[in-house]
Amino acid sequence: MKLGLVWFGNDLRCTDQKMLSLAAQEVDQLVCLYCDEPQHKQPSRYATQGMSALRRRFLDEGLNSLATELEKLGQTLFVSQHDVVTSITLLLNELPISHLYCNHNSGWNEQQSLEKIAHDFADVHFHIEHGLTLFEPEQLPFTFTSLVTTSTKKPEQEYGFPSCFSKFRKLVEVLDPPLSSPHVTQLPMVSELLLKLSLPLIRPWKPKPVTSIPTFAGGEKAARQQLNHYFSTNLASHYKEVRNALDGWGNSTKFSPWLAQGSLSPRQIKAALTQYEEKYGENESTYWIYFELLWREYFQWYATYYGKQLFLVGGLSNAKTHGSFYAERFRKWCEGNTPYPIVNACMKQLNQTGFMSNRGRQIVASCLVHELAIDWRYGAAYFEEKLIDYDVASNWGNWQYIAGVGADPRGGRRFNLEKQTEQYDPNHHFIHKWQGHHYDSQLDSVDAADWPISPQA
């Protein structure tokens, strides 16, 4: 009897999952695991509090959905309250697991965890798939020195990793993403040995009740509904015209939360987009949806390639930055209480919904870095806490881009906030909707010698 372990991370779906297809073919019994580490009680080094309630609810809904889909396939979702290394080490020591299946994750911590497990359990067959990206690493004309691929360099892989998105796009937009993986109709039975073990912190997932109707509902069912709904309209043919709007459901695809959760794959989106173009025709707007997918793709491989440099203040080249930490300024930025109404409106929208438009993200990031002179990593950490579509590669890569320590060949982006307001909210409808015009006119109320200060009630 061959026993396999499927490790779910930010890939909470059963469709377009090659790792599940392989497990169905190769093993007789299976353990499906998600590591749901308990929230840290202490603030992070960036004064953030971990996962927000909105992001937590979105995750719970995704796990509810995954557990339901696995049950249809004859499986059970087990959830561990240990960290990844502890969880998988415990299972590999207690059970005769011969195969481990997972998707490559571009996050530095996830890569380090996988490398440690692979090193400690060399007798286990590791199947590392790429269900979170458009392309397989073997397709790319550049190579990586990590667990991403074990294949040798091919003659056509003659490029180093592209230093900017434009170079990356020119190399990859001619490639065809692989087709979605075949749908699995049945999975191997749940491991009988696991059911007999007494592991109080690794238990079957108990569905969490949904107490209200959220703007975004987590999980594969909701993801498919949004995908089908969007491409059943003509919105894709007008995407580029409205993509910079600060608000409005139909002004962007809204796929990003489900992409970040992995309840929707980029290949599923590309397949739906291609089908739409075949039926209604291609134009600049439909191409721009693919263009945005390629931006996301760039940051996935960017994070894989640069590793922990994604989190260094100096970024990729240890560039000199001028940001510091001003406790009061940061708190006011987080609350939407700065002298900039457009920034305040965006931040209040984020705090209340867990979402913000792409244009809004650029505006508030530019404000934090260039107007408030705060270390960009504080903003990235706050987005990590609040955004329901938080993705480690896209989030930290984009913040580096704005701060001028990442992939932007121009050395950073500073937005004129008055001009941005005139262009994207000329009548202040967005500002008034989110009460961005209500703020404390005095940005700094204490002298630097008095810092750090305690948050006011």
Image: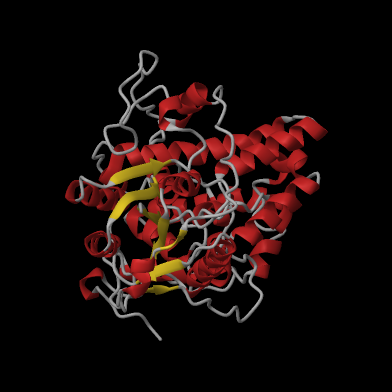
Please tell me which residue is depicted at 41% across the width and 31% down the height of the picture: 137
User: Is 162 drawn above or below residue 34 in the view shown?
Assistant: above
Please tell me which residue is depicted at 63% across the width and 43% down the height of the picture: 269
Would residue 375 appear left or right of 218 to someone viewing this image? left
In the foreground, 86 or 172: 86
User: Is 82 drawn above or below residue 29 in the view shown?
Assistant: below
In the foreground, 112 or 344: 112
Q: Is residue 71 visible?
A: yes
The residue at the far top in this view is 155
Instruction: State which quarter of the image contains the N terminus.
Output: bottom left
Colour scheme employed for the rendering of this structure: secondary structure
Instruction: State which quarter of the image contains the C terminus.
Output: bottom left
Residue 138: x and y in percent read 41, 27
The residue at the far bottom in this view is 457
Would residue 423 appear left or right of 346 to someone viewing this image? right
User: Is 232 drawn above or below residue 154 in the view shown?
Assistant: below
Q: Residue 219 falls in which quadrant of the image? A: bottom right
Please tell me which residue is depicted at 38% across the width and 83% down the height of the picture: 456
Q: Is residue 39 visible?
A: no
